[in-house]
Image (cartoon, helix red, strand yellow):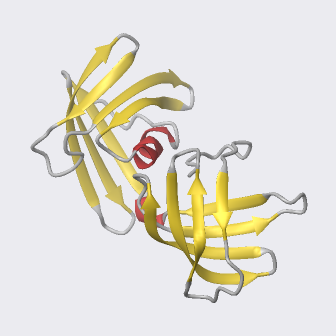
Amino acid sequence: MSFTDDANRKEDIVVTIPTGCAAGNVCGDINNTTVSCQWEMTRSSVSGDVFAYKFSKTMSGECPALGGGTLTLQSDGTLMRAHKMPDWAGTQTLTLKDGKSLGVWHGLQGQTAKCQANYEVVGNVVRFTYYTDADECLGEVDEIQWRLDDEGLHFHVIDIKNAPITEVTAVWEAKPWQKLADQ
């Protein structure tokens, strides 16, 4: 899965669509070798060279079967994938103070999640070790680098443990973070 606005980013995916599949039925799978995840697809519709799908279930890897999208056959024979994950849309705030962090996410559909961690600088990496007695992000460890520029605070994931790396990377790296206020 690509969680970037960079139109030049390429990922290797293997798409299997058997002939004769009907709308509403399982119609093959997508294997994204870049993130080591494979999902079963259910066909939503076909219109010309556009195949609309939803993920039915995760077949392998740690990526949840969320959302759906389209596969469009391009004139050069390549397949363009546009994927939508509305369940994850929302706003996240991160508060860092005295070696403790608090991340709060508010989804567009009224969902809320809160993750608390201790953080420490180890060389040029910041390690977030989430509480083992928490309701969210239980025992997760994120190793992150960051840089600040005019666009905001950019995070880069070095490693994620005890959590699905694709989704957690999306939270950290999707867009530059913006400062809200001094607290």
Point out the residue furthest to the top here. Answer: 123
In the image, 108 versus 15, the foreground residue is 15
What residue do we see at 44% from left, 57% from top?
60
State the image coordinates of residue 64 (x, y, percent, origin top left). Answer: 41, 60
State the image coordinates of residue 7 (x, y, percent, origin top left). Answer: 72, 47
In the figure, is residue 37 to the left or right of 97?
A: right
State the image coordinates of residue 5 (x, y, percent, origin top left). Answer: 63, 46
Do we see residue 40 in this rendering? yes
- Vertical comparison of 124 with 159: above or below: above
State the image coordinates of residue 79 (x, y, percent, origin top left). Answer: 76, 60
What residue do we see at 66% from left, 57% from top?
14
Do we see residue 65 in this rendering? no
The number of discs equals 0
Point out the residue furthest to the right here. Answer: 75
In the figure, is residue 141 to the left or right of 124?
A: left
Among the 4 quarters of the image, the one containing residue 112:
bottom left
- Vertical comparison of 17 with 1: above or below: below
In the figure, is residue 76 to the left or right of 111?
A: right
What residue do we see at 31% from left, 14% from top?
122
Point out the residue furthest to the front here. Answer: 18
In the image, 65 versus 109, the foreground residue is 65
What residue do we see at 9% from left, 43% from top?
133
- Vertical comparison of 86 with 138: above or below: below
- Vertical comparison of 86 with 179: above or below: below
Name the image quarter holding the C terminus.
top left
In the image, 19 versus 45, the foreground residue is 19
